[in-house]
Image: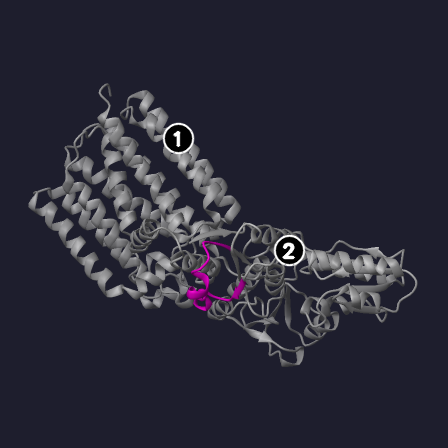
Amino acid sequence: MEVKVARTAGFCMGVRRALEKALATAEQAKGPVYTYGPLIHNRQAVEALEAHGVRDFLASPEAAPPATVVIRAHGVPTEVNGALKARGLAVVDATCPHVVASQRRIEQAAALGHAIVIAGDKDHAEVEGLRSRAGARCVVVSTPDEARAVELDGPACLVAQTTFSEETYAAIADALRQRLPGIEVVQSICRSTSRRQREALRLAREVDAMVVVGGRHSANSRRLAELCRLSGKPTFHVETAAELDPQALARFRVVGLTAGASTPNWVTRSVLQALEDISAPEPKAQWLWWRVAALLTRSNLYSALATVALAYACCQLMGVADPSPVFLLAAFCYVFAVTTLNRLAPGDGAGELATPRVAFYQRHAAALLAVSALFAGGSIASLALARARTPLILLLVAYAMGVAYSVPLVPQRWRRRLRISQLKDIPASKDVFIAIGWAVVCALIPWVGHGCGRPLGFAAAAAFALLLTFVKANLVDLRDMQEDRLLGRETLPIVLGARRTRVLMVGLAFVLAAALAAAAASGWATPLGWLLVACPLGILAHLAWAAHASDVACTLLADGILLLAGALALAWQALPLR
């Protein structure tokens, strides 16, 4: 099945900001932390927040125990804010800046004696907060008919709920202008909401059916579903992938996918993955290709094969024209075994928050562990039989480091003080250890095993493997930021932020390209370095394209950069004039 994904699907700025504030408050506050109202209309995200100490929401100020209270993105009525502070509670205001702007505009208009008309859902939390700032002369309308029945005179101001429908708001404004020609119409609908709605309608015209991912209580998710239904296309509103109806969806060849502003990215990706797994009426060869691709990427076999390609490229780069298959096998086995072990380590499971790949590991844990043990033992045995003593020692050290990454090493009495019990608890350490391990098996072991020739060539190859795998790992982390943040994984994108991480990855891509060109031009490495400059271009392509790709497609492209390196090395090795 072909799935077209809306570019604006997922968290809006206001929800993302509220989530970050709640998590930061939970980390810093000494006492309990509550939210006033559900922070996100998504059960999986709320459960993850509770695991971080952000407790179930408060229904009223009177119900609040001594605690820190986080005001959600919708905002609260003025009397609620006052009541919370009057009880001596610490209040962290995470109200969306767009909502704050609407609140201030209403206060200004009310201070001038203007009547206030609010276009929105009467019972919505944001509307309640807006209405509290409007004074006595305020009315809430949801439809043009309700607007025509409004009894107001004198100066008036029309403000919309930030997630309201653009089309409905325009119709309400027209209806009110006929009765109140001088009414001020404030364009308060969030631009993100507007883009999301327009894109959903545009996407609906291009597909056979639409799937909207979002909470049942999410107003903007419900509105997206309504708009898609009004387009005439069959529309399915689901909260998770488990709610998809494969039989109903299998009759459609092309399906559009969008998500509400409070829907976490990983939930949308899980739905995307499930949709692509559905057997739509498509050619059998295409269906079979997708199944094979999904198996290879989810089982990590594809990444292990890509590591063989990287190891071969490193060998060619440092002048090892005919690398031993034993060393290439060691790279394959190491990546598969260590990655599987760490994905199945205690505490790494995410339950309903798990991405499709992690869910695959959890379902097939026993088989994957058995295969990993077989591969690890085979790689060690093959080096022992080849009497490659130093490479064997290096491989054993690499395996020990890989195992130690998820094993508690810090004594119990020091853990609370250091806030670290194992290597994986060190912020942003995962991708650093990945890069070091890959550099060892792809460059160091083959270099030592083949006689330690061309030290500068080895340095170029090791730097190539280190930088390339470090950037590749962070490309995946960028997509998983929301899930990692909620699960307490402090990856580099979480430490630096998405924008800074992207800038860093682009910078490293250019550094890698320059280093490869310099190594080839100076003769430190073989001329293959000129061809391998294409790999940093693959990094830039991934950054530009893979933000909304499924896990399978993202992995195919990310590890495809390593396969590209191997393909270029094969082509260069075959050149008659190299």
Q: Is residue 252 magenta?
A: yes
Label 1: which secondary element: helix
Q: Is residue 75 left or right of residue 576?
A: right
Q: Position of residue 226 (x, y in %)?
A: 62, 63
Q: Residue at x 42, y 64 (%)?
A: 246
At label 1, which amino acid type do we have? Ala
Residue placed most toward the observer, 533 or 419: 533
Q: Residues within 10 Å of mark 1 (few under 14, many from 20)?
A: many
Does any portion of residue 453 appear in the rendered image?
A: yes
Question: Residue most toward the bottom?
Answer: 62
Question: Residue most toward the right?
Answer: 154
Q: Position of residue 448 (x, y in %)?
A: 17, 37
In which quadrant will I find the N terminus?
bottom left
Q: Residue at x 68, y 69 (%)?
A: 124
Q: Position of residue 347 (x, y in %)?
A: 35, 66
Residue placed most toward the observer, 546 or 223: 223
Residue that carries the numbered disc 2 in the rendered image: 193
At label 2, which amino acid type do we have? Thr
Label 2: which secondary element: helix
Q: Residues within 10 Å of mark 2 (few under 14, many from 20)?
A: many
Residue that carries the numbered disc 1 in the rendered image: 513
In which quadrant will I find the C terminus?
top left
Q: Residue at x 66, y 51 (%)?
A: 191
Q: Earlier in the sequence, mark 1 or mark 2?
A: 2
Bounds of the magenta segment: 235-256
Q: Position of residue 413 (x, y in %)?
A: 34, 68
